[in-house]
Image (tube, helix red, strand yellow):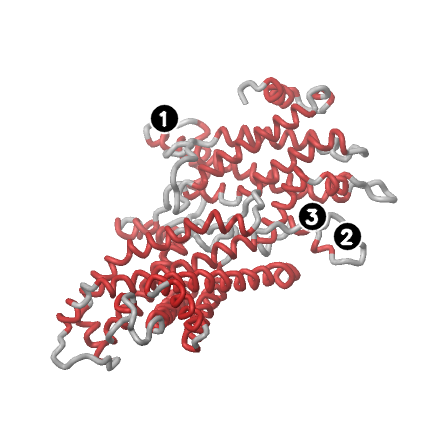
Amino acid sequence: MWFEDQILLPRIARSFLWTTVIQEIYLSVIFLILKIVAWNPFSGFIDWLFYLIHWKTLTYRSILCFATIAFGVLNRRFYCAEKHICSTRFEKLCRALSPRQMQHFLITTFLGGVASYCCIKLFQNFDTDRQSLLSSFLILENDFEHFFVVQHGCYTAIMFNLKYFICSLYLVKFSLNQETKLQYMKWQAFDLVKDSATNVLKGLHWFYLLFIFIGPIMENRISFLRLELDANESYASLLHSLINMKLLLVTFMTGVIIFLNWSLYLTILNAFITERHVFPIEIPVKSDKSKTLSVALRNSENDILKYLAVVDFRLMAQQDPERRKQIFAISHPGGHPHQWKAISDFCMTSLDAFLQKLHEHSIITAAKESKLIYNKGNFTTLDEQRFSVESALAVPLSEKVIACLRKWPTIAYFLDELPSTKIRKLFNPSQTLIWMIEALGYIVSASYTEDKFGVIQQTLPGIIRLLLDIKVAEEKLPIDLVGIRTHVKDPYGRYEHIHQRVSLKTSVNASLCRIADTFKNDINGIYLPEEYLRYLQRYLNRKNM
């Protein structure tokens, strides 16, 4: 596919390059500061230069960079723009224990151990003669301490994996705010360091407890690995050696470096992938039409391509009058608005499908409420017809088995549907729909002065009716138990559907207000049923929107 080869893979390659460069820069700055603190500024700077070109330093820093790149290559298959919503806890468990997920956990655990080992060697090569004061705080003395830090590197990788999937860090987060990469990194730098240090500190005491409780197993592994321990040194004395500020400092620093490197890569990758790509509106006859905006919008194989196309469409509708002229253009000969027809048909089809889902969800919710009323004794004619039809239908065998299994509370805990699953699935892909609604509002408003051939006028009544129907259908949905709140801190995305619902309502209102203000002098000339026309008049008067 042209998108993979020409856009996505080059952006991933550039993100690898910039991650490696920034990683090398910040590690060099850290060791320069340590050298200056250990020695006077002049001799520390000279010693730092010799340290950078030492073959051991170059080797271990190269391996550390390759570990970060291997982490990025391993996560390539998880990159997407829309989250998968699990219906039950059993589905979550199956996804977590799938072979692909387990392979990811094992490989990243190994990469965490490799990265921590490289950090140990970099600290060890910091002052091989151990003449400075800091060498006693950075250089580990025995194999047990090496083993402890490497194990913590593996543990840090596991913790990062858990956060990676629980907080959906694999999602590519698109935004209309197209900042430069330098500005984006300035905003993210402090948060990345703070988040890395906080997460490592939160998990450090749990790792110490885990290491203490699995003492007998670790003792057998230490003897199996033939680490150099004194004959009279028992495992209890080794555990006593864990109370060591040097070991704590090195363990903390290696964990932060691993966490920061991988978080840095994901941040840079997100900045590169979400960079705006300008799709051509019309291209020569013999060219590849799959690269046009209308075809990219209809793409269903790669959601990242679709999001890039929708972002480009949204920004073009607001900011680019030259490209809007191509949307308003007609064919010669024939006089057909092919570009507008292709784009508007896709947008209206997508919005109409979403509208049908809103109606279905409202009907299902009303059916559940009527079933509750029936259980209380209030049985209406409509309920009687529906329940008679339901009873006539044959229940599949699989549903009968699941119903029997649900009689046990423990199994029911895993098989019961999670709260707000249906409405979360409903609003999960709504971000592209929100940008389509906003883009339609901007294009319709701009057509009042820019559309010389009147191509928008034919679809204007349908657009207005569709937006008003979406608004009415959204208002019929039940309010979520946590309420409509956008200020809630939500790192796990539990209330994301509420934020999307608020954004959808805001975008519909803004687009209808924009259209009403633009056509306020000709609003009676738009062919709309009286009910829709009366509803649109509210936006003109700014009443009961």
Residue at x-position 60% and y-position 17%: 541
Position in image of residue 53 (x %, y %): 46, 74
Disc 1 from disc 2: Cα separation: 63 Å
Quadrant, the C terminus: top right
Instruction: Single out the mark in the foreground, 3 or 2.
Output: 2
Residue 182, above or below 462: below
Q: What residue type is labelled 1?
A: Asn
Q: What secondary structure is marked by label 1?
A: loop
- Asked whether the viewer can see residue 330, the reply is yes
Residue at x-position 23% and y-position 73%: 144
Q: Which amino acid does label 3 sit on?
A: Ser
Query: Where does label 1 land, which residue?
Result: 378
Disc 3 from disc 1: Cα separation: 52 Å
Query: Where does label 2 land, which residue?
Result: 283
Residue at x-position 41% and y-position 63%: 101
Query: Where does label 3 land, which residue?
Result: 294
